[in-house]
């Protein structure tokens, strides 16, 4: 992988750019998994979002039927 950034960018900016790229990758991949697993577990997912979490891989809110996926999974 080659990360192209502005010449004077610091490590924090490089990390943000990399995280942004990982987020886009997950946003493309996750809907396929949702379609695959909804019929298996007999639950309909209303939406999902991607977060940075320190202690969990993901969270499922059964009331709102929303899934939160850890960005670190990418």
Image (cartoon, grey):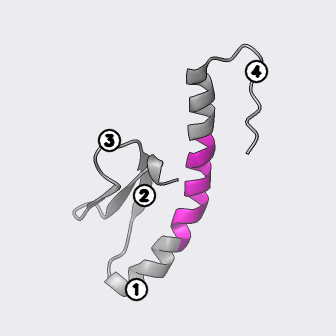
Q: Is residue 29 magenta?
A: yes
Give 4 or 62, whichever is nearer the viewer: 4
Provide the secondary structure element on which disc 3 rests: loop
Whole-percent x, y for residue 4 in the image = 77, 32
6 left or right of 17 in image: right
Count of marks overlaid on the render: 4
State how far apart marks 2 and 4 are (Cα).
32 Å
State how far apart marks 1 and 4 are (Cα).
45 Å
Judging by the rendered image, the residue that carries numbered circle 4 is: 6
Q: Is residue 23 magenta?
A: yes
Picture residue at 77% right of the left edge, 17% below the top: 7
The numbered dot on residue 48 is: 2
Mark nearer the N terminus (1 vs 3): 1
Whole-percent x, y for residue 2 in the image = 76, 40
Judging by the rendered image, the residue that carries numbered circle 1 is: 39
Q: Is residue 10 above or below residue 14?
A: above
- Quadrant position of the N terminus in the picture: top right
* Label 2 crowd bin: few (<14), some (14–19), many (20+), radius 10 Å: some
Mark nearer the N terminus (2 vs 1): 1
Mark nearer the N terminus (3 vs 2): 2
Provide the secondary structure element on which disc 1 rests: helix
Mark nearer the N terminus (1 vs 4): 4
Provide the secondary structure element on which disc 4 rests: loop
Judging by the rendered image, the residue that carries numbered circle 3 is: 54
């Amino acid at each position: 992988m080659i990360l192209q950034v502005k010449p004077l960018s610091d490590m924090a900016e490089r990390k943000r750019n990399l995280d942004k790229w990982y987020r886009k990758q997950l946003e493309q991949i996750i809907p396929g998994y949702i379609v695959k697993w909804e019929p298996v577990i007999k639950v309909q997912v209303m939406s999902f979002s991607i977060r940075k979490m320190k202690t969990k891989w993901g969270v499922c809110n059964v009331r709102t039927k929303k899934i939160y996926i850890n960005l670190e999974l990418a």
